[in-house]
Image (cartoon, rainbow, N blue to C red):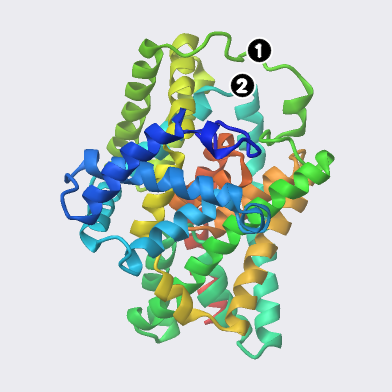
Amino acid sequence: MKNLSTPKAAPWGSQQIAGMPMMIFLGLATCVLFSGWNGSLPLGMVGALALMFVLGTLLTELGERITPVREYLGGGTILAIFGGAALFEYRILPVEAGQVIISFMKEGGFLNFFIASLVTGSVLGMSSALLKNAAMRYLPVILGGVAVALLSVGLVGSLMGYGFKNAVLLIGLPIMGGGMGAGAVPLVEILSGPMQMSSADLLSRMVPAVVIANTLAILMGTMLARLGRRYPSLTGNGNLMVKESSRKVAEEQVQAPTLESLGMGLFISSSMFVLGSLLGNFIPMHPFALMILAVAFIKVSGVLPRRYEQAAADWYQFVVTNLTPSLLVGIGVAYTSIPELINAFSISYFVLVLVTVVGGALGAALVGRMIGFYPIEAAITGGLCMANMGGTGDVAVLSAAQRMKLMPFAQISSRLGGAVMLILATLLISLLA
């Protein structure tokens, strides 16, 4: 993580955490943790963000220092998510403090704020020509990942006695459907009648698959990042299109961010989220999808002067650098249930979920390679970001893969790809149910 600024080999006494000497950080962190422990943590953004920042920074630092965790389990990303969840699930920290975080993440809209900053800044900061070319080619990558994932889980399910239909409809579709709210829950409404199952029964089967797949997608993001370091020809190091890295992009940042540019970037990204929500009142699409389309239109049309595009990109960099660990802890506390994962675990169920995630990544990589995308970036965005839990999963997967600049394409997978899966579900149910 970028907020951990000291090399790993440096002695503890000379380290900096979050840009400040360790002793200063630990002194402030002790104050925040004690406040959370004794029930005096302020409600709202101030208390929640302070506690999330402390826990996120400490857990990501620890995850990056434990070699097996760093190399094989997702490093600080995975530890921040599951460590944060465990601290409150097992009452190491009071439930009341956890509720402050949950309220900030859900009612306070911190996740929306974070994603709006990332999407707006990364889209406005990229090349217009690149955006046009990549968007036209990206849908086949998503469809390739979905096709391989569903076919693979169906075949393996039939071989294991689970059944082709059940494997595809109850495991494959929910996993590739864009998370809980945009995927599993709408699928229940579509499938409950034809499958002759109650909504509660369907959810009890779908939710564990989505949660386990989200975890596997994060781990695979780490593995793909390591694969890219070992085989550089397979990756663009965050660039999706092969041609993108072969030429100098004319729109590179030439000035350091200023306080004024950060303020403008905050306003622009927030306004784009409001615009997406406003359009959602008239167009039956997810507000995030509409926001992406609106920002892409603004970028391609050139109506916004370059100075303001760069301000949005500056703000995006600020948010990613300073707030990612905080958000990961929030994802763990507000959206991750450890008992749910444990209760659903069985070897056969795990294998089917794994086959779905691997199939999605492999299919996206193969199709991406054929149409001029780097296989690793295509697998991450078109495969893993279809198989994770939507917006929360996108942040975690891209953080683990160290490719946060791919957020616009990850959001296309989670939002527009999720809508495609609901349409596909209505077709498959008539064929399989």
Tag shown at residue 127: 2
Mark 1, residue position: 250
Position of 78 compared to 322: left or right? right
**In front: 351, or 285?**
351
- 114 to 66, vertically: above or below: above
Position of 280 compared to 221: left or right? left
* Cβ atoms at labels 2 and 1 below 8 Å apart: yes
Looking at the rendered structure, the secondary structure element under dot 1 is loop
The residue drawn where x is 53% and y is 65% is 175
The residue drawn where x is 47% and y is 50% is 59
**In front: 279, or 222?**
222
Looking at the rendered structure, the secondary structure element under dot 2 is loop
The type of residue carrying mark 2 is: Ser
Query: Looking at the rendering, in which quadrant would you find the N terminus?
Result: top right
The residue drawn where x is 63% and y is 64% is 357
Q: What is the residue that sits farthest to the bottom in this orientation?
A: 161
- 259 to 106, vertically: above or below: above
